[in-house]
Amino acid sequence: MHRHELEFEQTRTTILIGRGLLGRAHELLVAEAGLAPEERIYLAIDSGPEGIVADRHGRVLEAALGEQGGLARGTFEALESAKSMETVERIWDDLLAAGIDRRGLMVALGGGIVCDVAGFAASGWMRGIDLVLAPTTLLCMVDAAIGGKTGVNRPLADGGLGKNLVGAFWPAKLVICDCDVLATLGPREFKAGLAECLKHALIDGEAAMNAFEGDLPAVLERDLDAMPDFVARSAGVKTSIVQRDPRELGERALLNLGHTYAHALESNVDLGLLHGEAVALGLVAACRAARAAGLLSGDELEDRVRRLLERCGLPSSLSAGVRIDLGALRDVMRLDKKSLGGRVRLVLPRGIGQIEVVEGLPEDVVDAGWSAILAGD
Ligand SMILES: NC(=O)c1ccc[n+]([C@@H]2O[C@H](COP(=O)([O-])OP(=O)(O)OC[C@H]3O[C@@H](n4cnc5c(N)ncnc54)[C@H](O)[C@@H]3O)[C@@H](O)[C@H]2O)c1
């Protein structure tokens, strides 16, 4: 079992990565999160797809936690449209009905959507209750469950979706990454997680890129024995960066490599992109924008990123015929939390392991990024 520790202000997060961990949840909660016998637990569980997370992994978790009295549960659809205040209010109603007080514990089992929304509900309930996350997607294990960001989306005036516009820093006490749950993850969702792993490798440096490339054959075969090392490496990159800059006052912003483009793409719900797929496109756009900004001198990095995305089965350009409204995407970029005062701020690569935040970029640099994923050349 791998272990990462993260001190986030007053909260210490322990991240455990291995196989067969959900079945040991009670023992781990007692040992690592100080679960007391009288503590009441609310389980927020992903209801999809076709109940597989709840029926298969939820049962393992509930059986393991069975010895704890006062277990309440709710299931939630992992849809971006349900990552909303309505869902948070539903959880709060459940917590009230279940008599969960300030000493209660929220345990979320699901991907980034369920963990983000349950985490945000935990942050507000009785001014904050303890949180434990059991991520069930690759993306959530290496990214969403680490670093304390929780939140919900808000509808935009044009009918789009403002991603994560409302939220709070509310770090989990314990993150249980049981790689066995990845066996049931759909192929598209699994590949989407690889985009964040590639991003972490790009940020970390050449050794991490080589390790990523070396691990890919076993990972793409979904060899569960290979997953804990792979997940631990990628989660370790995020953990170290968040440890140095928990509140994103500096270095943590590097984790947004590709994300300003990705969030704009995701706001166009008609494109139907998963977060990881949008990040994949965002990485290509960031390489091209870096070249236009004079940070990169050639296409080598963009080509390497495209090749790796292709190996992972991820998009490196939008499908032919997809129509997008560039003006609307530019507007969303200005609204992005990473932008300051309406000026787009991009996280761009100067090379592998050399990522920079660049502010006040001219529009043609930003548009160069868009052209990379529109033209697909
Ligand atoms: N808080 C953060 O720091 C952070 C970071 C990155 C992403 N996010 C957020 O995470 C969300 C995306 O999360 P995600 O990609 O983890 O997935 P998700 O929560 O969107 O779930 C994707 C799909 O996979 C299903 N699923 C989940 N686990 C499964 C399993 N083990 N077997 C079968 N099906 C399973 C879900 O039901 C859903 O249909 C976005 O809303 C994004 O904004 C948050």
Image: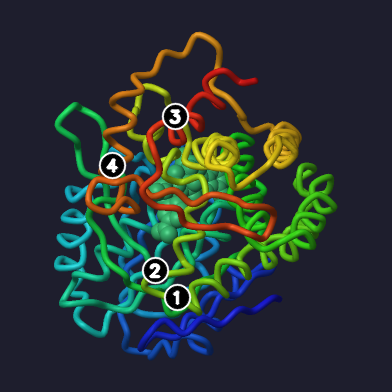
**Secondary structure category for the residue under label 1:** loop
Residue ID for mark 3? 367
Is the residue under label 2 in contact with that under label 4 (CB below 8 Å)? no
Q: Residues within 10 Å of mark 4 (few under 14, many from 20)?
A: some
Marks 2 and 1: CB-CB under 8 Å?
yes
Residue 166 left/right relative to 109: left
Q: What count of labels does the image hold?
A: 4
How far separated are the C-alphas under marks 4 and 1?
24 Å
Residue 159 x/y as whole percent: 20, 27
Name which quarter of the figure residue 221 lies in: top right
**Is residue 53 at least partly visible in the picture?**
no
Which numbered disc flags the more N-terminal residue, 4 or 3? Answer: 4
User: N-terminal of the two: label 4 or label 2?
Assistant: 2
Query: Residue 269: x and y, percent?
Result: 34, 28
Left or right, residue 271 beside residue 19? left
Question: At x 45% / y 59%, what residue is drawn?
Answer: 109
User: Residue at label 1?
Assistant: 245
- Cβ of disc 1 within 8 Å of ligand 1? no
According to the image, label 4 marks what residue? 334
Question: Where's the C terminus, which quadrant?
Answer: top right
Q: Which circle's residue, 2 or 3, is located before the other in the chain?
A: 2
Determine the CA span between mark 2 and mark 1: 6 Å
Callout 1 amino acid? Asp
Q: Which residue is identified by label 2? A: 248
Which quarter of the picture shows residue 320? top right
Estimate the spatial distance between the alpha carbons at disc 4 and disc 3, rounded to whole Å. Answer: 13 Å
Q: Secondary structure at mark 4?
A: helix
Residues at marks 4 and 1 touching, judged by CB atoms closer than 8 Å:
no
